[in-house]
Amino acid sequence: MGSKLYTSEHRIRFSECDPAGIVFYPQYFIMFNDLLEQWVDSMVPGGFSSVIAQKKVGMPTVNLQADFRSISKMGDDVVLSIGVKKIGSRSLQLRLQCVGKDGVLRMEVQQVIVTTSLVTHQAIEIPEFLREPMQAYLLEDEAITA
């Protein structure tokens, strides 16, 4: 199985920066949440909004680890990416990165998401309509577990 990353080009905006003109760190989490929604939009008919509103499946974050490696400044062009580290029965481990067009890793996140019923608010098995397309993004040397 060949893995791929879901990527999106992004220009760092004034609204994402602190007075020094560098990304204010919480803004990375907003960028990555937007990227996650775009990724689901690309895989599921009806997109992320249908997952939440019609299918009633939540995807809350239960663990988040962030490493800030290099600054990003207003006007920088970067590439945001998502790769799947592990697909479990009810959870998904993701690696998200922000890399400058210069190839320098700016920021990296390890994120664990659990799929939940938005009716009961309990963890549920990852629905097949998410599990199947996500497998294409499984990073090399990572495993799919039951």
Image (spheres, rainbow, N blue to C red):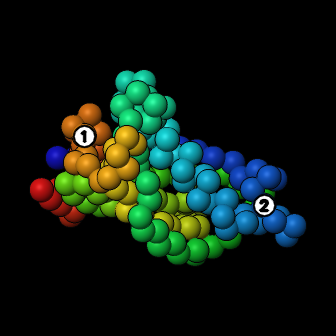
Residue placed under numbered mark 1 in the picture: 127
Q: Nearer the viewer, residue 34 or 116?
A: 116
Between label 2 and label 1, give the one nearer the viewer: 1
What secondary structure is found at the residue carrying circle 1?
loop
Q: How far apart are labels 2 and 1 at the CA level?
A: 37 Å
Which picture quadrant has residue 29?
A: bottom right
| Dot 2 and dot 1 residues touching (CB under 8 Å) | no
Can residue 84 be seen in this snapshot? no
Extreme left residue here? Answer: 146
Vertical relation: 144 (above or below) 129: below
**Quick check: 36 left or right of 119?**
right
Residue placed under numbered mark 2 in the picture: 17
Q: Residues within 10 Å of mark 1 (few under 14, many from 20)?
A: some
Amino acid on which the number 2 mark rests in the picture: Cys
**Quick check: 60 left or right of 22?**
left
Could you tell me how many numbered marks the image carries?
Answer: 2
x, y percent for residue 30: 62, 54
**Quick check: 29 left or right of 3?**
right
What secondary structure is found at the residue carrying circle 2?
loop
N-term mark: 2 or 1: 2
Extreme front residue here? Answer: 120
Identify the image quadrant of the C terminus. bottom left
Name the residue located 38 percent from the left edge and 36 percent from the top edge.
Answer: 56
